Amino acid sequence: MYGECCYNTCQEIKGIVAATQNSAKQTDLRALEALALRQGGYFDRRDAHDYGITDTLLQYHKRTGRFERVLPGVYRLSAAPASLLDQYLLAWVWTNYRGAISHESALALYDLGDVLPARVHVTVPRPFHRTSAPFLVHLAPLPEEEVQMYNGVRTTTPARSIVDAAANGTDPTQVHKVVREALDRGLVFPDALRAALNRRPNQYMRNVRRLIQEALAGATQATG
């Protein structure tokens, strides 16, 4: 039994050495960890490959406790400190960096209103087939002008977030509050909010346009 264990360990070490030597890219574990630390400790399998960390090496570092697998294809540096933005960073990385935090989750990230969704909303352009995560996934286009980095997380702009949340059923009272706060803080301007309404008029089933216009009018009266 002891001899068999030694043999298996030697074979594993040989496999790791071979994976390192055969990697098409220079193995740079420190650079991968530096990337992960900038985003809550999270990284995906493609990130690892970009830094020369093969699947064999990934599995090795998972077994030794250096990395932990949190979702299919998504890993976390075990030594990374916890962050208040963890759930948002994880959702973003899980989309292969293609998505953006959106809807009520984006409003919470911007600290607008009192919305606290139970699950993270994330919007991802088609095609996207991942389903193995506890997020609310919305499949929709994400033009560059409607996304931005906010506190290190890719997020839909305030105007897009407000319109998406309103269309998704956020309480009208909260929509009025969010619009007023966003205007007061200079996060959005009336024209930008109206433009966000006009970009995809067929996407929204509720009378979002009237709701937003009423919110804008109410905010104007409150400051007038």
Image (cartoon, grey):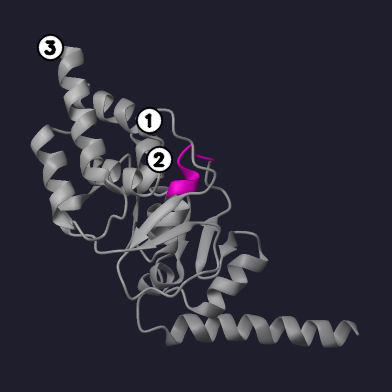
Separation (CA) of disc 3 from disc 2: 26 Å
- Residue at x 21% of width, y 22% of height: 218
Residue 201 forms part of the magenta stretch = no
Residue 27 percent across, percent down from the top left:
41, 72
Q: Nearer the viewer, residue 112 or 54?
A: 112
Q: N-terminal of the two: label 3 or label 1? A: 1
Q: Dot 2, how many residues are within 10 Å of its Cα: few (below 14), some (14-19), or many (20+)? A: some
Q: Dot 1, how many residues are within 10 Å of its Cα: few (below 14), some (14-19), or many (20+)? A: some
Separation (CA) of disc 1 from disc 2: 7 Å
Instruction: Check disc 1 and report the residue beneath it.
Output: 174
Residue that protrudes farthest toward the left in the picture: 191
Q: Are dots 1 and 2 in contact, CB under 8 Å?
A: yes
Question: Can residue 166 be spotted in the picture?
Answer: yes
Instruction: Check disc 3 and report the residue beneath it.
Output: 224
What are the residue bounds of the magenta stretch?
Answer: 82-88
Q: N-terminal of the two: label 3 or label 2? A: 2
**On the picture, is 102 further left or further right than 33?**
left
Q: Nearer the viewer, residue 93 or 196?
A: 196
Say the numbered circle drawn on residue 118.
none
Secondary element under disc 2, as helix, strand or loop, is loop
Amino acid of disc 1: Gln
- Residue at x 43% of width, y 69% of height: 48
Secondary element under disc 1, as helix, strand or loop, is helix
- Dividing the picture into quarters, in which one does residue 97 lie? bottom left
Q: Nearer the viewer, residue 150 or 45?
A: 150
Q: Are dots 3 and 1 in contact, CB under 8 Å?
A: no
Q: Dot 3, how many residues are within 10 Å of its Cα: few (below 14), some (14-19), or many (20+)? A: few
Q: How many marks?
A: 3
Q: Does 168 appear above or below 65?
A: above
Instruction: Check disc 2 and report the residue beneath it.
Output: 170
